[in-house]
Image (tube, rainbow, N blue to C red):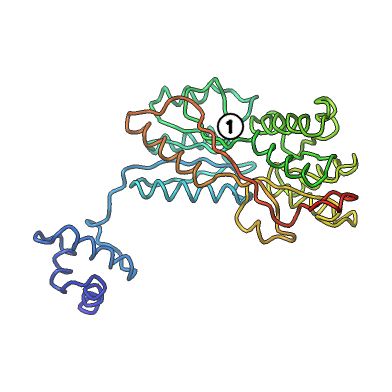
């Protein structure tokens, strides 16, 4: 114990007697000195005495889809850190195939008395889902915020990336490289982010390449699953239709598209260009490094927490959608269209 006191005193720059007073909860210690001692405890890896531990302001539930797609853990980390800084304890509840449903996870969190819930890419993004579940939750007095997806039927704050602008960035980049046959690989059509990406893709293809909307939607848009295998299947179908570039709705799908090209003996980006979406952790280190649309994860996560805490505090944000602008990150998976090597 004496050795420990000496270590803490040295780290905090105070006397051992001061450390002892802080650890025993005695008065007569300045707040800044007390904080220095507690910080020294943390730095040295000592556990704070129970009475000195910060009380949690409450639990906040975070419901996400599976964690195999690295963008979800990245978002969960941002949200978790922001909640912790505000004194809340995040509780991560993950949906897995064959596991608990969103409704079951919500009920579990409500039963545990959470102060609020953040839903990421949940049923609120599915146009075929019953939105009454959210109204029932509101009637129970539980504040919540919805990330990635929008429904006019739900009175709540929404946090979204600008999916239409994302597709405009991707198509504009590929068109500037001389690609005229650009495909879009994305998830099932019933999801709001998918519908918005299609709208942005079709509009930009019309504006830049003069194609008809009906042709774009029937020949250049391919629905699949948000997985590597889904991207591979969608890209295969699009390349069959003569596409020299593929825009994917997730980085995982983009890696599948690269695999599909290689299975045909094609080189990425010399023969086929591929653009992802998310800019997931480590995606800059793939082969080739992936050109992608960076989802504004830090800004979205922090906004979700800030908005929820306003709801919890009784000063709710307007029931509207906060839309965040993505950005194009150009790396090594896009290049000039085949037969158009004069371009840079």
Quarter of the image containing the N terminus? bottom left
Q: In the image, 99: left or right of 221?
A: left
Q: Residue furthest left?
A: 28
| Residue 155 % position (x, y) | 48, 22
Q: Nearer the viewer, residue 55 or 287?
A: 287
Q: In the image, 300: left or right of 47?
A: right
Q: In the image, 9: left or right of 144?
A: left
- When asked about the image quadrant of residue 164, the answer is top right
| Residue 215 % position (x, y) | 85, 28
- When asked about the image quadrant of residue 128, the answer is top right
Q: How many marks?
A: 1
Relative height, residue 217 to residue 324 (above, below): above
Task: Residue at 55%, 21% (x, y): give it.
Answer: 152
| Residue 288 % position (x, y) | 74, 59
Q: In the image, 326: left or right of 47?
A: right
Q: Nearer the viewer, residue 343 or 215?
A: 343
Q: What crowding class fits label 1: few (fewer than 14 Cα within 10 Å), some (14-19), or many (20 or more)?
A: many
Task: Residue at 50%, 41% (x, y): give it.
Answer: 300
Relative height, residue 151 to residue 271 (above, below): above
Task: Residue at 51%, 36% (x, y): give it.
Answer: 119
Q: For mark 1, what is the residue?
A: 149
Q: Residue furthest front?
A: 342
- Helix, strand or loop for disc 1: loop
| Residue 111 % position (x, y) | 41, 35
Q: Residue furthest bottom?
A: 3
């Amino acid at each position: 114990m004496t050795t420990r006191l000496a270590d803490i005193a040295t780290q905090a720059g105070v006397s051992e007697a001061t450390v002892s007073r802080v650890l025993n909860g005695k008065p007569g210690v300045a707040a800044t000195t007390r904080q220095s001692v507690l910080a020294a405890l943390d730095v040295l890896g000592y556990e704070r005495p129970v009475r000195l531990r910060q009380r949690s302001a409450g639990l906040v539930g975070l419901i996400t889809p599976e964690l195999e797609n690295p963008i979800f853990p990245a978002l969960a980390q941002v949200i978790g850190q922001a909640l912790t800084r505000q004194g809340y304890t995040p509780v991560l509840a993950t949906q897995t195939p064959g596991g608990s449903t969103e409704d079951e996870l919500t009920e579990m969190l409500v039963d545990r008395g959470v102060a609020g819930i953040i839903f990421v890419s949940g049923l609120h993004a599915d146009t075929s889902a019953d939105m009454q579940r959210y109204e029932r939750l509101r009637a129970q007095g539980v504040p919540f915020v919805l990330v990635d997806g929008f429904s006019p039927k739900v009175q709540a704050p929404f946090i979204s990336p600008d999916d239409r602008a994302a597709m405009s960035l991707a198509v504009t980049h590929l068109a500037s490289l001389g690609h005229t046959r650009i495909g879009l690989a994305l998830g099932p059509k019933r999801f709001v982010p998918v519908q918005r990406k299609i709208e942005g893709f079709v509009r930009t293809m019309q504006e830049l390449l003069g194609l008809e909307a009906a042709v774009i939607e029937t020949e250049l848009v391919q629905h699949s699953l948000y997985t590597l295998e889904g991207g591979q299947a969608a890209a295969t179908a699009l390349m069959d239709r003569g596409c020299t570039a593929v825009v994917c709705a997730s980085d995982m799908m983009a890696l599948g598209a690269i695999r599909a090209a290689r299975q045909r003996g094609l080189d990425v980006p010399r023969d086929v260009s591929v653009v992802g979406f998310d800019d997931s952790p480590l995606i800059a280190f793939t082969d080739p490094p992936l050109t992608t649309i960076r989802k504004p994860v830090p800004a979205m996560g922090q906004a979700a927490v800030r908005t929820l805490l306003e709801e919890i505090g009784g000063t709710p944000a307007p029931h509207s959608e906060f839309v965040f602008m993505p950005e194009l990150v150009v790396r090594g998976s896009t290049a000039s269209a085949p037969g158009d090597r004069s371009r840079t």
